[in-house]
Image (cartoon, rainbow, N blue to C red):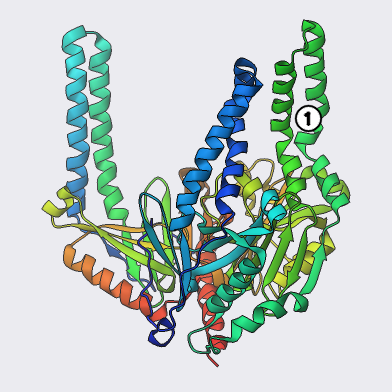
Amino acid sequence: MTVDALTPWPDTVEWRSVSPKLITVELIVRWSWTVIVVAGLCVGLVLQGHWLWQLGIALVVLNAIWRSFVTVRAVRAWGYAERDQDLLVRHGLLVRRLSIVPYARMQFVDVTAGPLERAFGLATVQLHTAAAASDAQIPGLPPAEASRLRDRLTTLGEDRAEGL
Amino acid sequence: MTAAGPPQPTLPPEAAVVEPRRRLHPLSPVLHGAKSIAVVVAALSWQTLSQVGLERFALVVAVIAVAVVIFSIFGWLTTGYQVVGRELRISDGVIWRRNRAIPLERLQAVELRRPLLAQLTGLAELRLEVIGGGKTEAPLAYLTVREAAALRQRLLALAGRTQAAAPPTDQPADAAPAAPTLERPLLRVKNRDLVVSQLLTPQAFFLPVGVAFVVLQFVMEGSWTFVGIASTVTAMAGVLLQPVRRVLQDWDFRLARDPEERLVVRYGLLETRSQVVPLNRVQAVGATWPLLWRGQGWLHLRLAVAGYAGEGGGDAKRSDRLLPVGEFDTARSLVWEVLPGVDLAALATSPPPKRARWLNPIALKSIGVGLTPEVLVTRWGLLTREMHLVPYARLQSVRVVQGPLQRMLGLATVYADTARGRSGQAKDRDLAEAYALAAELAVRARQARTNLKTPAQP
């Protein structure tokens, strides 16, 4: 039996992926930073004119191009699935992570949206349990889906709420 | 400050019984002041003492202490607590007033601490451990011992009550005085064993070397000044602090079960602590076999209780002891008491596959994971062997993580997260096995939770 680290239990679990618009958001963030760093390096180049500055610029740009490809794949790697009793979240390319968080263990749900995310109509849902180590975060959800998920999680959490 | 407040079940019939707001003991400010003297002396250090002279030094310390006492008096005047329904309300703060309502369902453990000065004056500090709090919530310092013990009984009785089967409210009042007589003692650690165990630590082994080094240095330089010696002694004390502290803290360690089957832990020489932990609040149990204790066959056990979070100062300050030192048989019976059905001697673990050797060249054999009907067992460490038991009912979430190297070898690590302490870690398992393990853990955790729930509603 072959197991793919990105899609465990493919036949029983219906994985949902996050919005592809998240790719755009991530790329904008990455390239804005790249532009700022390159601008700084250009100032250095103009003032000093050493070849190391050019090398630096080349490296930064190359890194950004490389990371852009990774970002595309990384966003596609994000996935979540709602099962009867728990929420599954998987993400990561280099380090692959899968979290299984039972609804009953949920302490509270965060829905956040930064300015850029809002501009693209996205939001991030994060589930918190009593364990600090749990990480169940789903970025790049359309607001309607985010609030649906939040409401569903809170209802299920209340249904099954119990002490520690 | 967490916003993790649960939906507050308002209980109108109980909330109607409003009791007066109570104050802490009037001696509290004095004790706070006295406590600050030690801090001030430590902060000023020996160097300052030699520079300003003894009289001035004493004067500065006294002035600061008096200032603290005056400040504490204001603090005392504004601090009050009261039990309302199933909540403990505490208000304090001189400049910034703070009112806290602590829902008692979230109470994890209650500790009664008596530092040396409090012992002399017959006072005690009550510390509540609440889930979700970054630090120990609401240390009530100080109350009289009788008051503190009664309040503790009362809070625990309120906290342990399920909504369905609520006994009459006036019950805790007569339960409090009767409680101590009915306790069933479980174990008592011999002080001799404790001292020997702390001598068998790396720090204690270092002591002769340190002393020789210092003496040698003085002989070479030929100067013996008071400040020099005092500083050296302080430095040595710093090294020896941990074992000495351990001995002082774990002195006369006793464990008992109270009538409600809660665990009562008492220990300490200069500062006595007595801690009551309901057994369903135990998140995990850890066992450690230090290298130097192998000869005696000793181990120590730790208890992970949610809420003992942001307390600084490393492990010496934390109250997580279940057994400071003991033989295997003692530990075995103790684990049976705390996690019923778990036999420390019969915990089989299986090592990861052979190819995990690339990631753990030496210690592969010592890593292992096992599932018993009640707990997840994880084991690791070659020299200092460690074991971690997580009851399924206490699992918060399960994670499978695969790093790049693990991916090349087709391995993955499974984490079983609990509300407190380290997560149970099944390191470097075969990928298919890891997913199977994660699924199995999720199922078992769910079953354990439902099993827990059913007896509560007969």
Residue B295: x, y in percent? 87, 47
Query: At label 1, which amino acid type do we have?
Result: Phe
Neighbour tally class for label 1: few under 14, some 14-19, many 20 plus, Cα within 10 Å: few
Q: Nearer the viewer, residue B382 or B31?
A: B31
The residue where tag 1 is placed is B206
Residue at 53% across, 44% down? B69
Q: Quadrant of residue B178?
A: bottom right
Question: Position of B54 compared to B166: left or right?
Answer: right
- Quadrant in which the N terminus of chain B appears: bottom left
Q: Is residue A136 visible?
A: yes
Residue at 24% across, 40% down? A68
Residue B425: x, y in percent? 57, 56
Residue B448 vertical placement versus B269 (above, below): below
Q: Quadrant of residue B59?
A: top right
Residue B217: x, y in percent? 77, 12
Question: Position of B323 compared to A13: left or right?
Answer: right
Q: Nearer the viewer, residue B381 or B265?
A: B265
